[in-house]
Image (cartoon, rainbow, N blue to C red):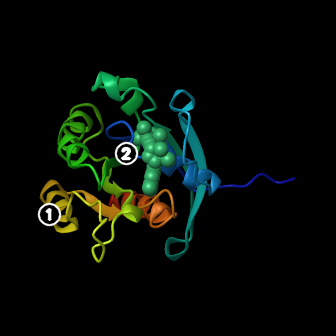
Amino acid sequence: MAGISWNYVFKFIITGDAAVGKSSLLVRLTDQRFLANPDPTLGVEFGSKLLTIPEENKVIKLQCWDTAGTESFRSITRSYYRGAAGCLLVYDVTSRKSFVNARSWLADVREHADPHLTCILVGNKVDLCDSESSSDRRQVPMEEAELFAKEEGLLFVESSAKSGENVEKAFEDAARDILSKIRRGV
Ligand code: GDP
């Protein structure tokens, strides 16, 4: 059987505080499922997925690495960042602290990763927000995160690994941006 071919392989890394949903985003992307009670000791560390970008007529193989358990060390080794083309900087929209900490995760990425790395800020767990309801758990207004992303030159999306909303989009938007950099020779 002929193997599936692709035009590019992009390495992606997923960073952010513990419990924001990094493993869940990766499981949703690669396996189309959601685990309500994932075993933290069995965090997904790696996932691979083919993405088609129709308007560019390109197929991209994403190789995604989750920080799985390294959050407590705060800084991650250089080898983890080496060769990464894309980064998902994840926070939880119901946790102000995780959004505040996204700044230091970004600093860590900027310190170690390639300066041309495409970074997308991902506000996860948007399924827990309902502005019409008194049980709305949102702690980070979308406008505030959008402004932060704009100031820092990041792409931005709100997602839910639970419902699947915007999960592929997060990876696709970043992949499109990387492709456009390649086209422009950046
Ligand atoms: P990680 O430590 O950043 O990899 O986070 P996990 O993927 O282990 O998720 C932490 C907890 O949040 C788990 O109980 C998940 O089921 C839950 N979780 C992850 N993503 C979502 C989401 O989009 N919505 C909701 N409601 N819960 C989520």
Q: Residues within 10 Å of mark 1 (few under 14, many from 20)?
A: few
Q: Is residue 11 visible?
A: no
Q: Which residue is mark 2?
A: 20
Rounded to the nearest whole Å, what is the CA distance between mark 2 and mark 1?
Answer: 20 Å
**Residue 134 picture location, percent across and down:** 27, 69
Q: Which residue is mark 1?
A: 147
Q: Amino acid at mark 1?
A: Leu
Q: Nearer the viewer, residue 4 or 73?
A: 73
Residue under the point 58% across and 43% down: 47
Residue under the point 31% across and 65% down: 135
**Residue 32 location, quadrant:** bottom right
Q: Amino acid at mark 2?
A: Val
Q: Report whether the residue tagged 2 is closer than 8 Å to ligand 1.
A: yes
Whether residue 120 sits left or right of residue 30 in the image: it is left
Whether residue 146 sits left or right of residue 176 in the image: it is left
Whether residue 65 sits left or right of residue 182 in the image: it is right
**Residue 142 picture location, percent across and down:** 22, 66
Residue under the point 48% across and 56% down: 161
**Residue 95 picture location, percent across and down:** 26, 49
The outermost residue toward the right is 1
Q: Nearer the viewer, residue 61 or 108?
A: 108
**Residue 75 picture location, percent across and down:** 28, 25
**Rendered view: 75 above or below 184:** above
